[in-house]
Amino acid sequence: MAVAARVAPKDFFSPAEWTPLSARSSWKGLALVAHGWGVILLAAAMAMAWPVTIPLAVMIIGARQLGLAILMHDAAHGALHPNLKVNDWVGENLTPGGLVQYRNYHLGHHKFAQQSEDPDLGLSAPFPITRTSLRRKIIRDLTGQTHLKQRWAPLFRRIRERKPGDSVASILWKFVRSRPKFFVWGAVTIALTAPFGYGWAWFVLWWLPSATWLPMVTRLRNIAEHACIAKDEPDPLRHARTTHASLLERVFLAPYYVNYHCEHHMFMHVPCYNLPRTHRLLKAKGVLPRMLTAPSYLDVLRLATSRPVGEDRGGSPTPEERGVVRAVIQ
């Protein structure tokens, strides 16, 4: 197997520079998790008080759902808290969860980044595509079709292909047990809000963002990170892309420093909150021109949709949409 080339921190930083970059704070990661949930609760309160703001709340909440997944990703690298037990408990219980399974999968992505054995290679392989193709994918995301194929199609397939003696009720019960957070917290939230006339809140302000805005911003994030990077790329400074994110993009698309993806692949154990400082130091040392970067998400999308219209590959679902590629959010 072709293992991706790696870089050594000592090749770029002195010990005095590297020590604070790699240090795990006992409070910063936890503060980001609290921030994510706080923003979700405030956006939900805003929407319940002023229903006209529901579309805005859906976008904000969907982006913070991605943010919590990003913080679980940090936990998978042991970067959320210096105490590994605290790190793993928070990563499992206060983010989307499935931490151990995700860690095993995701570390393979780092080990074989952009090589043939990279389990995430299917995310970047189709690019560039046409603008029409991307538009179709975004429509599928925002209309819930991607969510349906990823989350619910397996259930319908099991019911349709069930063997004699397998009841629909038993299949449904197994499905519910496989997603305890989704169903338990949904039931708890509905029970707490329904007496006050907000029984709709969980469906509109949690499930709807996760079924629409979250798949779209996850797709755009994946495109920015690895689209149009050559398979078997030998340069470890070009296995992933760092994209400059404006304030609005950080709010609605790229929370918690996820846009510093090249730096993350170079130094995967650096906590996310130290990635901006890592970027500034690399820029001061003249390393940035060697790295794969983009001035904006719009620039990346232009590159990712540069395939001529006549070469459109069609509107069939991508491997990600068919569930071949593992999704972060459970």
Image (cartoon, rainbow, N blue to C red):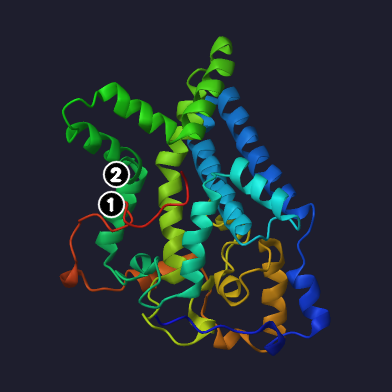
| Number of disc labels | 2
Q: Residue at x 58, y 62 (%)?
A: 258
The local secondary structure at tag 2 comes to: helix
**What residue is shown with label 2?**
149
Among numbered discs 1 and 2, the one appearing first in the sequence = 2
Residue 61 located left or right of residue 177 = right
Numbered label attached to residue 322? 1
Residue 266: which quarter of the image?
Answer: bottom right
Quick one: label 2, few (<14), some, or many (20+) residues within 10 Å? some
**Which residue sits furthest front?**
165
Q: Amino acid at mark 2?
A: Lys
Q: CA distance from mark 1 to mark 2?
A: 6 Å
Whether residue 1 is visible here, answered yes or no, is yes
Image marks 1 and 2: residues in contact by CB distance under 8 Å: yes
**Seen in the image, is 175 located left or right of residue 30?**
left
Q: Nearest the camera: 249 or 4?
A: 4
Residue 285 appears in the figure: no
Badge 1: how crowded within 10 Å, few (<14), some, or many (20+)? some
**Residue 273 placement (x, y as % from top left):** 70, 62
Q: Which quarter of the rendered picture does the N terminus lie within? A: bottom left
As shown in the figure, which amino acid type bears the numbered disc 1? Arg
Q: Secondary structure at mark 1?
A: loop
Residue 41: image quadrant is: top right
Give the vertical position of 234 relative to 183 (above or below): below
Camera-side residue: 110 or 307? 110
Residue plotted at (54% across, 44% down): 96
